[in-house]
Image (tube, rainbow, N blue to C red):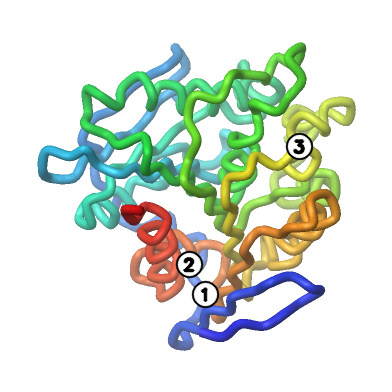
Amino acid sequence: MKRCAILGLAVLAVAPASADPVELSAFRDLPRPAPTLQLTYGEAPSQGIDVFLPAGPGPHPVAVLIHGGCWSAAAAGREQMRHLGPELTRRGIAVWSIGYRRANEAGGGYPGTYQDVGAALDRLVDAAGAHHLDLSRVVLVGHSAGGHLALWAVSRGALPAESPLYATTRLVPRAVISLGGVGDLTSFARFVPVLCGPGIVERLAPADKLSEVSPASLPPSGVPIVLVSGVFDRLTPPWVAHDYARRLREKTGTAPRLVNVSDAGHFDLVTPSAPAWQAVRNLVEASLEHR
């Protein structure tokens, strides 16, 4: 590992052994075990939560996983993250993997997608006692579109009270780890139709609502933020994280931690056999250590 400075931002460069980036087809083919249990917080099939529980009495630290997929129902939902459940539970970390109505689902987009993320997090607070979960040791981990939603979730308490997305903050995580996520929707919106198809960005982030849904436009929550990028990511290249970090630095004088993983693509960050996952797992574990 080595530290360097890019555009005045602190960057940690992680260099795993050289390997070809994981392709979407290989990621899709990963075996995905069933969760310990599934919970619901709404009537739509996507309004559910996969829970993976470690052995032992707890209380267990919690990794909240938020899946990607272009905010679109054309991609798999929370089931795409099930392969990470055993990866974390064998290390004593419970997994709370949330689904949400996507932008092109009935009830999704603005405000439904965001309200679902908030409701799934609130459900964690309500269910923690029954499942022996330690709410003082929680980390949000979002991949791709889920990285955007994780960054958004920690700032929803700063929204205007009249916004349909406003909610009292009931859960304060130790950190937010965005894996190839989007923090500045204003600058990234023009790429969404190419990557995700027509109509997604208009439903997810109407022009007059960008200030409510783009994390870069929201007041920082004070929660530590880590932005992890694969150097070979063709979908959300490292400049996407740098754009968001720059916006935060201009606004607050401080910047999130940037981690660029060499030889990694978009899906390496959530593929257990890829060296990049080891770096991600270390970040998750470090954020949940006893203090």
Circle 1 residue? 21
Q: Position of residue 215 (x, y in %)?
A: 72, 41
Q: Nearer the viewer, mark 3 or mark 2?
A: 3
| Residue at the image point whose x is 61% and y is 26% from the top | 113
The disc label shown at residue 201, or none = none
Residue found at x 34% / y 42%: 62
Decide if residue 155 is on the left or right side of residue 50: right
Q: Residues within 10 Å of mark 2 (few under 14, many from 20)?
A: many
The spot of residue 57 in percent (x, y) is 11, 38
**Label total for image:** 3
Q: CA distance from mark 1 to mark 3?
A: 33 Å
Height in image: 78 above or below 184?
above
Q: SS class of the residue under badge 3?
A: loop
Callout 1 amino acid: Pro
Instruction: Say which amino acid is labelled 3.
Output: Leu
Q: Position of residue 40 (x, y in %)?
A: 37, 19
Q: Which comes sooner in the sequence, label 1 or label 3?
A: 1
Q: Residue furthest right?
A: 208
Q: Is label 1 in contact with label 3 (beta carbons under 8 Å)?
A: no
Disc 3 to disc 2, C-alpha distance: 29 Å
* Residue at mark 3: 218
Residue at horizontal 60 percent and vertical 73 percent from the top: 260
As rendered, which of 12 and 205 lies closer to the eye? Answer: 12
Q: Which one is nearer the viewer's eye here, 281 or 272? A: 281
* Tag shown at residue 268: 2
